[in-house]
Structure formats: C-alpha cells, structure tokens
C-alpha cells in the first residue's frame, strides 16, 4: 500500500465512523505535520480538495438518508468534524499550494496602508512589517544554509543569531546581510535606507561588490543616481522610531511627508504644488491625523481641510486651486 492509498483509507475510515482512537490520533498528527511542512496535505492524498469535499458531502447525504432519525446524531457529528477538518485543510492548501508552473511555493505577507503586521519566521526571527509593505520567502529554502527574505516597503528585523546560516534581506536595490542583529530596512518612495539598532550588518548595492559595514546606531542611504551607499546624518533611532508608533520627519520634503502619512493613516493626502519645495522637521507620537495635519499646516504657513471623500489637502495661502 503506497502513501496515497494509506491516507485515502484513513480518511475513509474516519468518515465512515470506523476509525479508532489511535487512528484519529494519527490523523491529527498528520495535519499538524503537514501544516509545518512546505508539502501540501493534498499532495499526499493525490486529489484536489474540491473532489474530496464533494465525496464527503455525497457520503453524508447517503448516510443520513439510510439511517434512522434516533441514530443520526453521533455519525453526523463525526462527519461534520471530518468536513470541518478538511475545510480547514482546504484553506491551508489554497495558501501554500505550489504554482502550476512547478515553482516552489512562497510565503507572502502583506500589510495594507494603515496596517502593521508582526511576523515570526521558523527560526525565531521577528519582523514588524510597516504599512503598504510586502515580505516573502520560500519556506523550504529558508531551512537551508542561508536565510533569505525579500522586502518591498519597510520592515524592522530582529534576527535570531545563527553563525552557520547568514540572514539576508533582499530589496530591488539593496541586499543586507547579517548573522544576528536588529535593524530597519526602508525602500519606500525610492528611499533606500538601512539603520542598525543592535549588532552589525553589511549592506551591498545592486551591481556592486563593495559592502558597507554598519554598526549599532548607524545608518546608510542609497544614492539612486550614483548607486553609491552613503552614511546618513539622521539619527538611526529616528529611522525605526515607527516601531514605537512615533513618526519622525527630519528635513523631509512635503512630498515624502504626504506619502508617508497616506501609508500610516490609509487616507489620501494632497498638497498644492507651491508647497512641494518645503521641508519638515517634526516628531509625532500616537497622534491623530487631523492633529498632525494641523501642526504641519502651522509649520508650513498654509491651511488644511478634509474633503467630502475623506481625503485631506494642504493648501498654500497663495494658491487659488482646491
């Protein structure tokens, strides 16, 4: 009896109410193991989940029609449990199943505007994904000699130390390599920057073979024109202050401030072109959007107002446009 035949038999016995306590325990361990592995439950069964569920529904209908009302409840509960078990596996399968092209399945976590997500990788590495950002990795490859994740947006990493397996964060323009440390990576608005909280990292620009070593409380930014990494003057702690719900703008252009507020609060922010050349220095901790915009308006010498659609606009006092 091969593996597929074995699991088919186990499911059949469970659905028909013939599985003993030991067999049910085997099934429970099967699902727990499959949830931890990159191989799908349904690859073991050799059958698509929709087909399995259809067979279960058919079996359920047939049994209910054949049995007496007084004896229906116990088998019904067992069958309902089987359906629930398979339904849960179907959800898991839809998220983890490899692509039809044969590519290895990837785990993808996204945080929408106005959201932040906490992620714990299999090795214990902890990640806080900022709004409007995306992180992906290949679970099987991650267990290999190098731990690699791919980032679009911004995230703070607290990497589990493992000298034998370096940890890499790959972005469109930068690659950051560490053994065990905590640091921030930002790729928003063509603003490529790495700031180190603890330990040290090596950062390499794309198509470059000269890594830059950064230690605790240091950060670097990429000049996208020259493709050169430059140490940044801004305090590194300000770069990852967002982890503690603090927004820091250090001589930031209005365009960058507006884009960041949009991601943070998930509300469209517009501004008059006359304000585009101005810069902001400000710090906000757990402030509401109206309070932040009123403060910015005061600093810029402009006004702010909310439109009926919920968006906000910073309006220059010399501008006649809406």
Image (cartoon, rainbow, N blue to C red):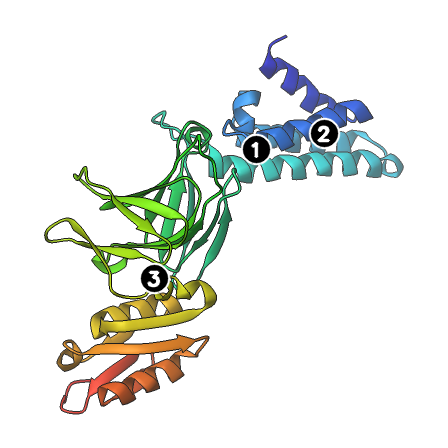
Q: Is mark 3 on a helix, strand or loop?
A: helix
Is 322 situated above or below 173?
below
Q: In this view, does 164 lie to the left or right of 75?
A: left
Q: Is residue 114 among what the camera can see?
A: no
Cβ–Cβ below 8 Å for labels 2 and 3? no
Q: What element carries label 2?
A: helix
Is residue 176 or residue 100 the one in the foreground? 176
Quarter of the image with the C terminus is: bottom left
The residues bearing labels 2 and 1 have C-alpha atoms spaced at a distance of 35 Å
Q: Determine which residue is flagged by label 3.
A: 236
Q: In this view, does 145 lie to the left or right of 122?
A: left
Which numbered disc flags the more N-terminal residue, 1 or 3? 1
Q: Which residue is drawn at 34% across and 71% down?
A: 248
Local packing at callout 3 (Cα closer than 10 Å; few below 14, some 14-19, many 20+) is many
Q: Which residue is drawn at 33% across and 82% down?
A: 293
Which label sits on residue 36?
A: 1
């Amino acid at each position: 009896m091969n593996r597929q035949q074995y699991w088919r038999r186990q499911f059949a016995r469970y659905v028909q109410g013939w599985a003993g306590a030991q067999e049910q325990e085997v099934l429970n361990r099967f699902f727990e193991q499959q949830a931890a592995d990159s191989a799908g439950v349904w690859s073991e069964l050799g059958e698509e989940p929709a087909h399995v569920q259809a067979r279960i529904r058919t079996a359920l209908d047939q049994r209910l029609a054949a049995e007496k009302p007084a004896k229906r409840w116990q088998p019904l509960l067992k069958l309902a449990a089987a359906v629930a078990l398979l339904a849960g596996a179907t959800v898991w399968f839809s998220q983890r199943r490899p692509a039809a092209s044969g590519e290895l399945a990837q785990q993808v976590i996204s945080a929408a505007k106005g959201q932040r997500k906490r992620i714990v990788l299999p090795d214990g590495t902890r990640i806080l994904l900022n709004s409007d950002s995306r992180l992906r990795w290949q679970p099987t490859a991650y267990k290999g000699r190098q731990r690699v994740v791919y980032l679009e947006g911004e995230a703070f990493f607290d990497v589990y130390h493992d000298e034998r397996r370096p940890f890499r964060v790959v972005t469109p323009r930068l690659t950051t390599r560490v053994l065990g440390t905590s640091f921030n990576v930002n790729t928003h608005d063509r603003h490529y920057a790495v700031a180190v909280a603890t330990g040290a990292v090596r950062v390499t620009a794309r198509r470059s073979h000269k890594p830059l070593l950064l230690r605790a409380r240091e950060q670097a930014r990429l000049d996208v024109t020259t493709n050169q990494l430059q140490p940044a003057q801004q305090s590194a702690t300000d770069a990852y202050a967002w982890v503690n719900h603090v927004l820091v703008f250090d001589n930031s252009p209005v365009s960058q401030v507006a884009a960041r507020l949009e991601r943070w609060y998930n509300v469209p922010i517009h501004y008059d072109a006359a304000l585009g050349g101005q810069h902001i220095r400000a710090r906000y901790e757990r402030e509401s959007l109206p309070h932040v915009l009123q403060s910015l308006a005061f600093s810029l010498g402009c006004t702010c107002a909310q439109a009926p659609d919920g968006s906000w606009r910073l309006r220059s006092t010399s501008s006649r446009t809406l």
